[in-house]
Amino acid sequence: MHHENFIFVSGCAPASGVKADTKIVEDLKKIFMEFDISSLTLLVPDVFDSFSGQDASFEILVSGTAQVLKLHFLGDLVEKSIVVIFVTDRLKAPESRRRLKDLPYTDAVKKGTKYEQLFKLLGVDEVIIRLNRSKAEMVTQLDGLKAISDEFEKTATGQSRLLLGIVTLGFKLDPMFQKEFIDEIIPDNQECPDGTKMTKQFLTTIKGELLNVPYHAQILGRNKRTRVILLDDFDPSCMLAMLPRVSEYLKPDTAQLNPKPDSRSGNVNVQYYPQTEIDALLEHFTKEKKQNERKVFFFPKDLSALAERENFEGIKDTNPFLLDTEKILKTDLPLVKAHTFTKQTKMSETYPKRITSEIIKSSFSSTISYQPTLGLILSFSGHPTDKSAALLSIHLEEEPFELVQKLNIPLEHFDYAMVPVDHLTAATNTFFFGLCTIDSHATPFKLFKCEQEKKTEQWNLTAPVEVRDTVGET
């Protein structure tokens, strides 16, 4: 059968139009993140069945003979994870104002224990709880995370990522509820040359000091292999906006800004949730883990229905990541360019790792063959630039992600390559393959022999042998 593999996606119906600032491209990008969380795969064209746009009515045209393409997740996989939980159970009244009483944060310690249970449930390697720490002690703890991030950046490879979590329980100054007061003490948005602005969310310590935790989170996120998740516990009964004379609890020297950075590029790796409720989080993820037997979670997708994520000014979006709660995935796959679609073939039973190859627009069908006797994996595909040639990529079984050699093969009229299941020959430096056609040609098959030169260990093609059709010329 001749397959026509094409999918046409149009952003509007005929005779209609779309806005100049349409979100079409963003919607198309999101659809490729709708993979099956159990198998980490995405099926095309099936994924377009539920495709809808924010501001356009999409129309999808798929060829009737299109073959299904399975794409595997090649994004960020968490290899190492650390979460620090800062618990502040009260805001102490200043000694100079004895008429004021301490302000308790409801069930702070109890909630901190629940957050610890949550992250242990999610398989986090290390969960640290810090109770009633000063601003200086908190900054020291965050600096320690930065040192760990710097070291991870030097040694990590492939898709490996470091996840750093910061949870804050205590009173906060929030621009949504204390805008007038915050604007009074911090009138400057500290806009940077890259267009980013300061996020005015401040945690108050037990002594009334102010700590801008998002500022420190974006510093952690500057390392490309670090992902930061920042959760602020939300308790309506403990809102400073509802308390009279709150400014009297705050130290006058704590409203100093951190030094203005050159940029806040680290925010692209920070997922910030300023209003989270631990009971809802713990109930949801316990159900997913124990009842639905989920082992892998994708953030921010798995938090989207439970908490609203902060949109940083000047940053379009934050990088997602996959959290493997039981370390069932490997993180030694190579990084893949963001603009490149890839397909992967998993060697069933004989080889557990995955082999990646770029999808190339060509009429020549891709083929992968495993040759255990030779310890080779052969990958045939269309040539990316030369339409008159096919491409043979040779990989070693021991290191399938490292390309050994590429060979160009004259394509002529052939449609695909065929390789014997195994080569039961005495020669350990020779293999055979054939080029085939599905149409009517005088030469439907051409046999190739590939030999490895002992001195250079390079593979070379010998003169092919044509197999003629009986209908054609002899």
Image (cartoon, rainbow, N blue to C red):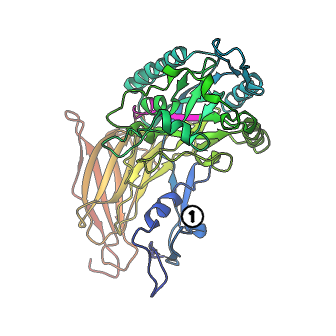
**What is the residue that sits farthest to the right in this orientation?**
291
Q: Is residue 37 magenta?
A: no
| Left or right: 367, with 170 as reference point | left
Q: In the picture, which quadrant includes the C terminus?
A: bottom left
> Residue at the location (36% across, 31% down)?
260
- Rendering coords of residue 337 (x, y %): 36, 48
Give the residue type that dot 1 points to. Val
Residues in magenta?
220-230
Element under disc 1: helix
Measured along the vertical axis of the image, is residue 239 above or below residue 355? above
* Residue in the foreground of this view, choosing between 464 and 228: 228
Q: Is residue 229 magenta?
A: yes
Residue 324 seen in the current view:
yes
Residue 352 seen in the current view:
no
Measured along the vertical axis of the image, is residue 113 above or below residue 432? above
| Left or right: 21, with 346 as reference point | left
Q: Residues within 10 Å of mark 1 (few under 14, many from 20)?
A: some
Q: Which residue is mark 1?
A: 47
